[in-house]
Image: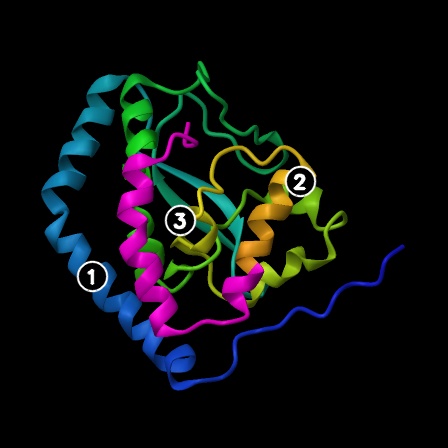
C-alpha cells in the first residue's frame, strides 16, 4: 500500500490568519442584505412548487475534517444524507422544476452564506463533498485529506476550471482534488479575488451542474 503523501498546507500569513475570515464575513454579510429579495423569492417559489422544506441540510466535512451541516435551497423531492446519498445526474427525476433552474444557475448554493457567517465555510475554498464520497475516496487517494487543510468554500479553483458535477470515478475526483490541493497549498488574497471574479462567468456558462 502506498504511503500517504505529504500535503502542503497554507503558509501562515496575515491574510490566511485574519484577512480571509474578515473578507468572508464582510462579503457574506453584504450579499445577504443585497440578495434578500432574491432569497425570499426563491423560498416562496420552492414552497409553492410542492411539499417539503425550503432549505436542505446535509452533513459535510470541513476544516480539520470536522463535520458540519451545509445549507442549500431544496432542489429535489428527496433529502438524502450519509450513506444514503446518491449524486445527481443529467435529467435526474428527483430534481424538481424549480430545483432544475436553481441548480443550473447555482442559486441553490446561496444559503451557504449562512455557513460562511457561522465560520464552517469560506467564500473561496474546496467544495465540501457529502460524507459518503469522502468515505469512498479517502482510502483511494492519499492526497484527498489535503482538502481539509482549509475551510471549504462556496466556490473554488476546481469550479472555475469546470470541474463540477458528478465525480463517480477516481479520475474525475482526482482532477478536482488536484485543483483543491493546489489552492490549499497557496492561499492568497490575489488568488481569492481571481477565483471570485471568474466564478460568475463559469456559473452562468457551465453545463455540468444538474
Residue 209 is a magenta residue: yes
Mark 1, secondary structure of its residue: helix
- 209 to 30, vertically: above or below: above
Q: Which residue is drawn at 51% across and 45% down?
A: 59
Q: Do the residues labelled 2 and 3 touch (CB within 8 Å)?
A: no
Q: How crowded is mark 3: few (under 14 residues within 10 Å), some or many (20 or more)?
A: many
Q: What stretch is highlighted in magenta?
A: 181-210
Residue on which disc 1 sits? 29
Q: Which residue is drawn at 44% across and 42% down?
A: 162
Q: Position of residue 167 (x, y in %)?
A: 58, 36
Q: Where is residue 210 in the image (x, y as percent from the top left)?
A: 42, 27
Q: Which residue is drawn at 28% across and 37% down?
A: 204
Q: Position of residue 122 (x, y in %)?
A: 38, 61
Q: How far apart are marks 3 and 1 (CA)?
A: 23 Å
Main secondary structure found in the magenta portion: helix
- 91 to 198, vertically: above or below: above
Residue on which disc 2 sits? 171
In the rendered view, does 137 fall on the left or right side of 194? right
Mark 2, secondary structure of its residue: helix
Give whichever of discs 3 and 1 has the lower sequence position. 1
Q: Looking at the rendering, which quadrant does residue 95 occupy?
A: top left
Residue on which disc 3 sits? 160
Q: Looking at the rendering, which quadrant does residue 179 occupy?
A: bottom right
Q: Looking at the rendering, which quadrant does residue 4 occupy?
A: bottom right
> Is residue 139 in sight in this rendering?
yes
Q: How far apart are marks 2 and 3 (CA)?
A: 18 Å
Q: Between tags 3 and 1, which lies in front? A: 3
Amino acid at each position: 500500500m502506498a504511503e500517504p503523501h505529504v500535503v502542503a498546507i497554507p503558509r501562515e500569513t496575515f491574510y490566511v490568519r485574519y484577512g480571509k475570515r474578515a473578507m468572508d464575513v464582510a462579503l457574506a454579510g453584504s450579499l445577504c442584505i443585497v440578495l434578500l429579495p432574491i432569497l425570499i423569492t426563491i423560498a416562496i417559489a420552492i414552497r409553492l412548487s410542492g411539499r417539503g422544506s425550503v432549505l436542505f441540510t446535509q452533513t459535510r466535512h470541513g476544516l480539520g475534517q470536522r463535520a458540519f451541516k451545509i445549507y442549500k435551497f431544496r432542489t429535489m423531492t428527496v433529502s438524502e444524507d450519509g450513506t444514503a446519498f446518491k449524486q445527481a445526474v443529467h435529467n435526474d427525476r428527483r430534481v424538481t422544476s424549480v430545483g432544475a433552474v436553481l441548480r443550473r444557475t447555482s442559486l441553490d448554493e446561496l444559503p451557504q452564506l449562512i455557513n460562511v457567517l457561522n465560520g464552517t465555510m469560506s467564500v473561496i475554498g474546496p467544495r465540501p463533498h457529502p460524507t459518503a464520497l469522502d468515505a469512498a475516496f479517502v482510502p483511494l487517494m492519499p492526497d484527498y485529506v489535503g482538502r481539509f487543510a482549509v475551510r471549504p468554500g462556496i466556490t473554488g479553483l476546481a469550479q472555475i476550471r469546470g470541474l463540477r458535477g458528478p465525480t463517480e470515478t477516481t479520475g474525475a475526483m482526482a482532477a478536482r482534488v488536484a485543483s483543491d490541493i493546489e489552492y490549499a497549498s497557496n492561499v492568497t488574497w490575489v488568488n481569492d479575488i481571481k477565483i471570485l471574479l471568474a466564478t460568475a462567468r463559469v456559473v452562468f456558462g457551465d453545463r455540468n451542474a444538474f
